[in-house]
């Protein structure tokens, strides 16, 4: 029987690129997203090209009460799965976020609270099944709090910490957890941002992610040089850092 | 919304464009609310047909939607490039029923220009193989059109240069092939007379035919050419290990713009002579893969940069068989006399019209020339040549054009008024427009 991957937040460009790469590795899919019918052309294309099964699942990350039932919903709609890829997130605009409680909660909930609750339940499911893996998309923004996007950064940093704990818990069971920290990626999320540099293609990021998962790496920076950029940023002493505009 | 500098493949003209990417069909009309716009695919038309101040990019709409192997039909989104489509159909024993000389245009662009290929004389343009078009109209609604449903819109959209709406998807009938390979015969001809004679002799025998003309040979050698004939190879003729091989990622890319004068009479003469003399015998047979056969120039990515930053014009016209040969000789002679060098000159015969109201192909010959834009005076010169084309009952190909004048255009396309009537009915506020449609007075 073929392996099945559940992708949460499947509409994003990174999620689609990951699905294409995983299809080449022989996976079937449950693709979950809000207003998931928009994914029908992508799903048809993937199924035709790669001769895989692709099921679509309506999923709202902000509906916390539904998260507990998520593993069973996926099983009912699609079948048992063994790989979870959590991609959803919400960038927001820092200036607007800083003024609006609603925006603050949206950024924190999408990137951390909802992600952690969903992963908590999905981890229980994988643990029961006794095999599989989990890929969580964090961000280089989570490595150090900066004035330009610390709501987003704090939530993504929290997610990285959460994944670290999950990895520690699931490692003895043979379930692998990969934390991904992408830099700037050329997606609709970043389409209108100015001043981006070293922008990577979603396809190359997805390639790195799938390879890192197969090699059972723990933390992946993609493209690779972000590991060194973030190492430098983390090592700047706080009394200097607080005066910088990054 | 970001602003980008865009141009067609000829790099002339260039325009600052606000680009919105369409991720769903509904984005196609919603992208620039209540403003004029144009759907833009791969920008592989040469002049300004693909340019507008505001465009909606169909690049993200590149999905296959349905495939019926028994019927040999595929339904896909309009932003899919031909190379992506071929990569899917070739291993399954199919090929495009009609293909232009590059595999990088979008399908939507190919339908909007009603493109023709080396098989036009025998099989017609791409319109013949389109079963249905799903078109997003100016008011945001999705219209299905075909030969039986909203047929007027169907025939206005095929060859309609994107002016009736934005094509979201289309259903295309494919060609069943026995392999990915082509059986080719190349015949060298010494001059125009011989070329046209061999064309006539081979018309009915080969599905594919095209001639590369050495436009720098003059006098008695005017029109010396390599005529390349082809058929899809049978399963026995293809390499047994990989009969349905798909094209690779291509070769090198031209990394930077050549200086504008790099392609001059001397270098072009050398290149054209090389192409002609590469084959010593008069006639030569071979089995070649579809990629070098149909898409020889795709091997060098961004080959348009060899013309330098000022770009180039592609001048392609069609003329009826009757009087066509004399007109082509006349035009080639005038071009040679003016000292203009055309790097690549391609001649082929065309068959019946497709029915597309603004479609280019008509029974006769078509000649395409690449002309570097070293200085703008060449534009007036080419417009003079266009007078000759009009006089001979011919027409200019809109997908290649950047310089045609309104009066000449109106004299060339007999169904223009019917097209305008349909355009007004489905786009009363004139939202879909391009630099070209403004220049030619269509919008």
Image (tube, rainbow, N blue to C red):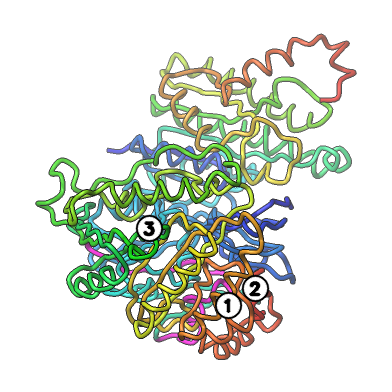
CA–CA distance in space, label 3 to label 1: 39 Å
Q: Quadrant of residue B344?
A: bottom left
Residue at (38, 65) in percent of width and height = B219
Q: Is residue B288 left or right of residue B133?
A: left
The local secondary structure at tag 1 comes to loop
How many other residues sit within 10 Å of disc 1, few (<14), some (14-19) or many (≥20)? many
Image location of residue A14, percent across then percent down: 55, 39
Image location of residue A230, percent across then percent down: 68, 18
Q: Give the range drawn in magenta.
A: B148-176
Looking at marks 1 and 2 on the same chain, the residue that comes earlier in the sequence is marked by 1
Q: Name the residue carrying label 1.
A: B164
Q: Name the residue carrying label 3.
A: B214
Q: Name the residue carrying label 2.
A: B432
**Residue B353 visible within the image:** no
| Nearer the camera: disc 2 or disc 3 | 3
The local secondary structure at tag 3 comes to loop
User: Badges 1 and 2: C-beta atoms under 8 Å apart?
Assistant: yes
Kindly indicate whether the residues beneath marks 3 and 1 are on one polypeptide chain. Answer: yes
Q: In this view, does B106 lie to the left or right of B93?
A: right
Q: Mark 1 lies on which chain?
A: B
Looking at marks 2 and 3 on the same chain, the residue that comes earlier in the sequence is marked by 3
How many other residues sit within 10 Å of disc 3, few (<14), some (14-19) or many (≥20)? many
State the residue in front, B213 or B79.
Answer: B213
Kindly indicate whether the residues beneath marks 2 and 3 are on one polypeptide chain. Answer: yes
Which quadrant is the C terminus of chain B positioned in? bottom right
Image location of residue B67, percent across then percent down: 33, 61
Q: Is residue B176 left or right of residue B89?
A: left
CA–CA distance in space, label 2 to label 3: 40 Å
Residue at (25, 69) in percent of width and height = B194
Q: Which chain carries label 3?
A: B
């Amino acid at each position: 029987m073929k392996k099945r991957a559940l992708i949460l937040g499947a509409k994003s460009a990174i999620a689609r690129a990951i699905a294409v790469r995983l299809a080449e590795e022989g996976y079937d899919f449950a693709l979950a997203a809000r207003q998931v019918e928009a994914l029908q052309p992508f799903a048809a294309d993937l199924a035709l090209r790669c001769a895989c099964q692709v099921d679509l699942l309506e999923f709202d990350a902000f509906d916390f009460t539904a998260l507990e039932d998520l593993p069973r919903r996926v099983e009912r709609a699609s079948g048992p799965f063994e790989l979870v890829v959590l991609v959803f997130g919400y960038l927001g605009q820092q200036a607007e976020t800083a003024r609006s409680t609603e925006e603050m909660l949206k950024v924190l909930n999408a990137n951390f609270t909802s992600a952690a609750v969903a992963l908590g339940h999905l981890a229980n499911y994988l643990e029961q099944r006794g095999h599989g893996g989990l890929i969580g998309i964090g961000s280089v923004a989570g490595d150090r709090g900066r004035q330009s996007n610390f709501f987003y950064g704090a939530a993504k940093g929290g997610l990285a910490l959460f994944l670290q704990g999950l990895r520690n818990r699931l490692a003895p069971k043979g379930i692998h957890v990969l934390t991904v920290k992408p830099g700037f990626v050329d997606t609709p999320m970043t389409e209108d941002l100015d001043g981006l540099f070293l922008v990577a293609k979603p396809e190359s990021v997805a390639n790195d992610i799938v390879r890192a998962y197969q090699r059972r790496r723990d933390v992946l920076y993609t493209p690779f040089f972000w590991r060194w950029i973030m190492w430098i940023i983390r090592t700047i002493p706080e009394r200097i850092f607080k005066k910088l505009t990054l | 919304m970001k602003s980008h500098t865009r141009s067609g493949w000829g790099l002339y003209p260039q325009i600052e464009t606000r680009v919105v990417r369409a991720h769903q069909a509904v984005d196609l009309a919603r992208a620039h609310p209540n403003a004029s716009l144009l759907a833009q695919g791969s920008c592989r038309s040469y002049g300004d047909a693909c340019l507008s101040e505001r465009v909606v990019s169909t690049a993200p709409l590149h999905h296959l939607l349905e495939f019926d192997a028994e019927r040999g039909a595929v339904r896909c989104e309009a932003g899919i490039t031909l190379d992506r489509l071929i990569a899917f159909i070739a291993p399954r024993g199919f090929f495009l029923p009609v293909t232009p000389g590059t595999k990088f245009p979008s399908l939507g662009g190919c339908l909007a220009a009603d493109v023709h290929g080396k098989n036009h004389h025998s099989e017609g343009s791409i319109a013949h193989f389109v079963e249905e078009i799903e078109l997003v109209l100016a008011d945001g609604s999705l219209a299905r059109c075909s030969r039986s449903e909203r047929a007027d819109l169907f025939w206005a959209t095929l060859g309609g240069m994107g002016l009736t709406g934005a094509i979201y998807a289309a259903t295309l009938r494919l060609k069943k092939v026995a392999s990915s390979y082509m059986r080719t015969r190349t015949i060298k001809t010494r001059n125009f007379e011989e070329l046209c004679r061999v064309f006539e002799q081979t018309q009915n025998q080969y599905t594919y035919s095209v001639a590369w003309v050495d436009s720098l040979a003059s006098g008695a050698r005017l029109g010396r050419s390599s005529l390349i004939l082809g058929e899809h190879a049978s399963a026995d003729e293809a390499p047994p290990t990989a009969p349905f091989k798909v094209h690779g990622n291509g070769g090198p890319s031209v990394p930077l713009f050549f200086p504008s004068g790099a392609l001059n009479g001397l270098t072009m003469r050398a290149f054209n002579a090389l192409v002609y003399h590469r084959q010593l015998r008069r006639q030569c047979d071979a089995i070649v893969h579809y990629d070098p056969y149909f898409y020889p120039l795709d091997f060098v990515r961004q080959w348009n940069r060899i013309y330098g930053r000022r770009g180039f014009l592609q001048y392609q016209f069609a003329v009826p068989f009757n009087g066509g040969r004399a007109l082509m000789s006349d035009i080639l002679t005038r071009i040679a006399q003016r000292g203009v060098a055309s790097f690549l000159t391609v001649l082929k015969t065309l068959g019946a019209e497709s029915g597309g109201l603004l479609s280019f192909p008509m029974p006769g010959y078509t000649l395409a020339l690449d002309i570097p834009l070293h200085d703008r005076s060449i534009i007036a010169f080419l417009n003079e040549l266009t007078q000759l084309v009009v006089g001979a009952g011919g027409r200019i190909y809109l997908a290649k054009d950047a310089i045609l004048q309104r009066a000449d255009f109106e004299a060339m396309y007999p169904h223009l008024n019917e097209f305008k009537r349909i355009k007004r009915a489905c786009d009363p506020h004139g939202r879909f427009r391009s630099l070209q449609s403004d220049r030619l007075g269509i919008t």
